[in-house]
Amino acid sequence: MTTIAVIGLGTMGLGIAQCFAQARFDVLATDAHAPTRDSAADRLAQTLAARVKTGKLSATDCAATLARVTVVPDVTVLAQAALAIEAIVERIEAKHDLFAQLEGILPPQAILATNTSSLSVTALARGLARPERVLGLHFFNPAPVMRLVELIPHQGSDPQALALAREWAEAAGKTVITAPDRPGFIVNRCARPFYGEALAMLESGIPAARIDAAMMAAGYRLGPFALIDLIGADINLAATEGLYAAMGGHPRYLPFDPLRAQVASGHLGRKTGAGFVFPAEVVASADPAIVLRIEATLANEALWLLSEGGTTQDGIDTAVKLGLNFPRGPFEMLAQHGAAVIKTTLSDLAAAATDQMKPRYAPAPGL
């Protein structure tokens, strides 16, 4: 049986280990932080016990899943793994050093996968002895629940390694979408207008609850502000700032002042008890103009990403729907509204914007 190694046993890493163990892979798991490593088995047992209690997992399968996960003291014990997935701190130096160490431990044909959500896979592979065995496998949180995995090759990735990584992730029940090695990959990049355009409207005086109500009436499970409250305003700001920097400060990724002010206030959302709309309950109320504005910028961002290569319209739509729980993908939005309406909406937004912000609404080549 294929053995999967997972390095980093925080919430994400432990969730990835659970995914593969439930799919009957043998899993070797470790973490450099001893308390995190030592508590991993108990945390996994508690998670699985909750699934047994709700009837989502049988007691027999629970015991079998736990038996397939072996927590080991360090990476030197991972020599039998065919695939190693790191879920450690989001610092490229730490990930690169880990992979360099693993190259001296794992067999030459082993695949090294990063679960990074923001770092360049190309940069991570650079300088390694076997860069062709490096790729990205970006799981979404919570990993056992979210079906999407973004598979990120770099220019030198071995096609066989990519095929095996896809096969094993699909065997773990995941829908695998190839994503380009570009900042934010697919989902984190295409999500930015959902938040950003809502924040731009908030800055202009439109209430957050009204914006959320409009999006919910259009079929979204959560509006942008409720979603920020769920994720945490601080987490959303960090992701936005990271992409803004990676994309050269382009105004399409601007971290708007209301988001900065929200973080400064300490009202970060559910985890602090108050946010943009939480704890109030937003009731859906139709406002087609709000929906069109947000969906026009979502479609435009997807077209910009498509123009850069490495993905497809169907791939983007599937990734966005699975990764963000959107009712439709950006290209489905484009088809629904029509390219002419999207382009006119962007043109109107550009005409009303400051000179600094006009490039935010520049139409992508596909328009």
Image (cartoon, rainbow, N blue to C red):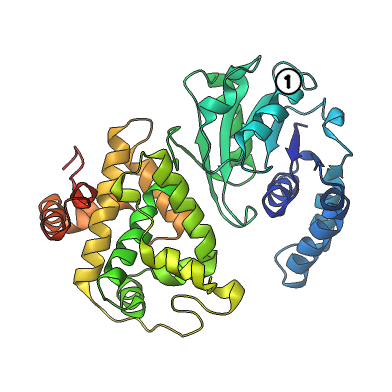
Quarter of the view holding residue 106: top right
Helix, strand or loop under label 1: helix
Q: Is residue 235 left or right of residue 362?
A: right
- Residue 358 location (% of width, % of height): 18, 50
- Residue 344 location (% of width, % of height): 10, 55
- Residue 216 location (% of width, % of height): 36, 74
- Residue under circle 1? 103
Quarter of the view holding residue 80: top right
Say which amino acid is labelled 1: Glu
Asked if one can make out residue 332 in the rendered structure from this viewpoint, the answer is: no
- Residue 113 location (% of width, % of height): 63, 32
Q: Quadrant of the N terminus?
A: top right
Q: Residue at x 45, y 72 (%)?
A: 226
Q: Quadrant of the C terminus?
A: top left
Asked if one can make out residue 311 in the rendered structure from this viewpoint, the answer is: yes
Q: Is residue 123 left or right of residue 248?
A: right
Most foreground residue, 49 or 356: 356
Q: Is residue 343 left or right of residue 136?
A: left
Q: Would you place residue 21 above or below residue 204 in this image?
A: above
Q: Residue at x 37, y 44 (%)?
A: 316
Most foreground residue, 170 or 96: 96
Quarter of the view holding residue 345: bottom left
- Within-10-Å neighbours for mark 1: few <14, some 14–19, many 20+: many
Q: Would you place residue 92 above or below residue 356 in this image?
A: above
Q: Residue at x 53, y 58 (%)?
A: 235
